[in-house]
Image (cartoon, rainbow, N blue to C red):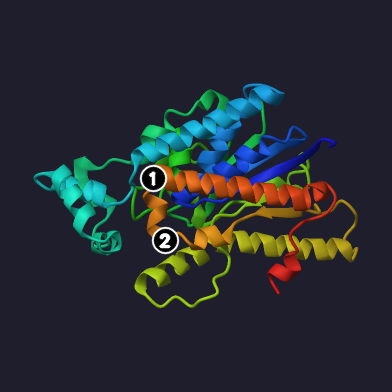
Amino acid sequence: MESRRINLALQGGGAHGAFTWGVLDRLLDEDWLEIAAISGTSAGALNGAALKSGLAQGQGRIGREAAREALAWLWGQVAEGSDLRTDRWMSAFLPYPDTVTRWLDLFTPSFYIENWLRLFSPYDSGPFYINPLERVVRDLEFESVCCKDGPAFYVSATNVRTGKIRVFSGAEVTPDALLASACLPNLFRAIEIEDKATGRHEAYWDGGYTGNPALFPLFEPQYPRDILIVSINPMARDSVPTTPQQIEERITEISFNTSLLRELRAINFARRVIAEKHLPEGTMKDVLIHMIADDETMLSLGQSSKITPSFGMLDRLKTAGQHAADRFLEAHADKIGREPSVNLSELFG
């Protein structure tokens, strides 16, 4: 098959990001498919960093195999963390933290623990505070993540003070930038990063609130028209949530899809304007949207599984991602570079 270029937009979703691992692992098999740029948020940013670090190490098979190894290493490290719940730091206040943690795991449903811990914030843990992602992030090969070789890489985070998105790129993609992109405020303390333009230190939360993932960095003229979104958060649910846990899950899904849907609406509008020739040719980029998702698998998982990674669940999600990528390639590979495989008008109909 002739060589074709795409951009990747990788959603965040905690441990469910292992689905994206599977998608990327499968896409790396396709020598004809060149990744020009990556935009990632939260778990999508971690996946993007591992992918970029591998692809930057060499052309062809060398870079692809390095990327595959980097992704496998990343999720192996995440699985070893085993649990990102706030009861991990909360138990540190107690006289016998390991014993209490095991007791809580054995005798108390996790969602009751989470509800109780909403009375506290990560700032209440004092000197016992630990961000379990820091160990993983700081071991990534940032010389490769930040280098000019391989695809361009963009990471999104939310400025706590202004509520606006900040997109990090190039040398700005530091360990702190990745931690900021994955900083859920009920689990982790805000990540402070200096704004070199103002000299002020700004606090950042998860990028999913303002760009999950951000598509606009991929509109630059040097990148191809095609954007392949790897979606983790289900767009639709058939049933109406009734329990407190179901309601909270749906609120999270809706809020973490809002920014993406907003950008897709803008793209749909721009494509209509271009098609109707209301603007001179070349004024706006005619973006082609593709998507890989598996809502059935994601709907079968509870919200708590996003912060309780296990080898079994991660392996299941990786396999689901590989199969979803297979289905996409079989059905839509020939559309890349020619036409969108997502009908945005139907999506918003």
Q: Residue at x 66, y 59 (%)?
A: 263
Which residue bears the numbered disc 1? 310
First reached walking from the N terminus: tag 2 or tag 1? 2
Q: Nearer the viewer, residue 39 or 112?
A: 112
Which residue bears the numbered disc 2? 302
Q: Quadrant of the N terminus?
A: top right
- Judged left or right of residue 160, residue 227 is right
SS class of the residue under badge 2?
A: loop
Answer yes or no: is residue 160 visible: yes
Q: Amino acid at mark 2?
A: Gly
Q: Amino acid at mark 1?
A: Ser
Q: Is residue 7 above or below residue 151?
A: below
In the rendering, which numbered label is found on residue 7?
none
Q: Which quadrant of the view contains residue 202?
A: top left
Q: Residues within 10 Å of mark 1 (few under 14, many from 20)?
A: some
Q: Residue at x 66, y 44 (%)?
A: 8
- Judged left or right of residue 260, residue 298 is left
Answer yes or no: is residue 217 visible: no
Q: Give the CA separation, mark 2 to mark 1.
A: 14 Å
x, y percent for residue 308: 36, 50
> Given the current orientation, which residue lies at the most extreme left position?
95
Q: Residue at x 30, y 62 (%)?
A: 111
Q: Nearer the viewer, residue 273 or 51?
A: 51
SS class of the residue under badge 1?
A: loop
x, y percent for residue 118: 27, 62
Q: Residue at x 34, y 55 (%)?
A: 186
x, y percent for residue 71: 53, 34
- Judged left or right of residue 40, residue 136 is left
Q: Quadrant of the C terminus?
A: bottom right
